[in-house]
Amino acid sequence: MGETLQICQQRIKLLTLSAHAKINLTLEVLGKRDDGYHDIASVLQTIDLADVISFQPSDDLEFVCQDTSGIRIDLLEQSILKAANLLRAETGCNDGALISMESVGIPRAAGLGSSSTDSAAVLKGLNELWSLGLSTNDLTLLAAKLGSDTPFFIRGGTALAEGRGEKITPLPSPDQFWLILLCPRFPSIADKTARMYAMLSSSDFTSGNLTNNLVVTLLNESHLNFNMLCNTFEKVAFDFFPGLDEFRLKFLEAGAKRVHLAGAGPTLFALVSDKKQGRALLTSLGNEGMTLYLTHTL
């Protein structure tokens, strides 16, 4: 009887993690590499927008999604199980797990790192559930095998990303600030990021100095200089996404001082002085053809 109760208690062990989205405070493309990727310099920042993922023991390795609103479950499952199987292969662990996406808070393929942060959460969650004892550095190395952005999400916060994005240097986080995300309701585009890289010409490549200047500022000041934000993909995004410039103009007309592209887009974001100003800007924007979020940095 006591043994049966112990097994039941083990079975219902539940671990829940929040997988947070990111924005790029800077994103410079430095040039194309011999392996076909591009070297970048980017300052990444996590924000308070997240997917919620739960883990519990199971005989098999399986995934379920509780929130099915407008999501390609097959692609989500493929990404989640790829991370889990990588962890198994690298550690020799044969344990199972039921991985459940409790809620999907991050828009997909929007430039906010949804797939990458989910994959990082799987590595962290299963490392704990299976008592593997991998360090943060160990998990970061594994994450690099899943995607260029994934290593950043092992730690989150604020960090410099170099190489193809997998070389992560943690940075002091600036004082918390508020922002509005504007996510246009565009159809998903296959190989979006690769196609946008292909649109860049050598004249669009930069030296990384803009990112370096922001890094130096963050190392010496707690207040973020909003004038230092930049994104190379803004040079091609408004041609790549038909109608995106109309959303940018709508953002400006509603009162945004400056509009930025999140990652490779199509999400746009604008910084606001506080939550009150953010709510006023949300009211001015309405929501026709877009999804809006008022959030802050972590």
Image (cartoon, rainbow, N blue to C red):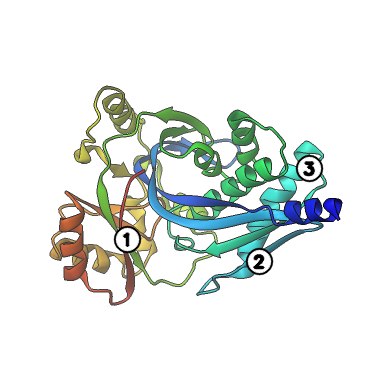
* Cβ atoms at labels 2 and 1 below 8 Å apart: no
Q: What amino acid does circle 1 point to?
A: Phe
Q: What amino acid does circle 2 point to?
A: Val
Q: What amino acid does circle 3 point to?
A: Ala
- Residue that carries the numbered disc 3 in the rendered image: 89
In front: mark 3 or mark 1?
A: 3
Q: How many marks?
A: 3
Query: How many C-alpha atoms fall within 10 Å of the one at disc 3: few (<14), some, or many (≥20)?
Result: few
Q: Which is more toward the observer, 192 or 23?
A: 23
Q: CA distance from mark 3 to mark 2?
A: 22 Å
**Residue at the location (40% across, 50% down)?**
263
Q: Which is more toward the observer, 163 or 155?
A: 155
Relative image position of residue 108 (x, y in whole percent): 48, 62
- Residue that carries the numbered disc 1 in the rendered image: 238
Residue 165 visible within the image: no
* Cβ atoms at labels 3 and 1 below 8 Å apart: no
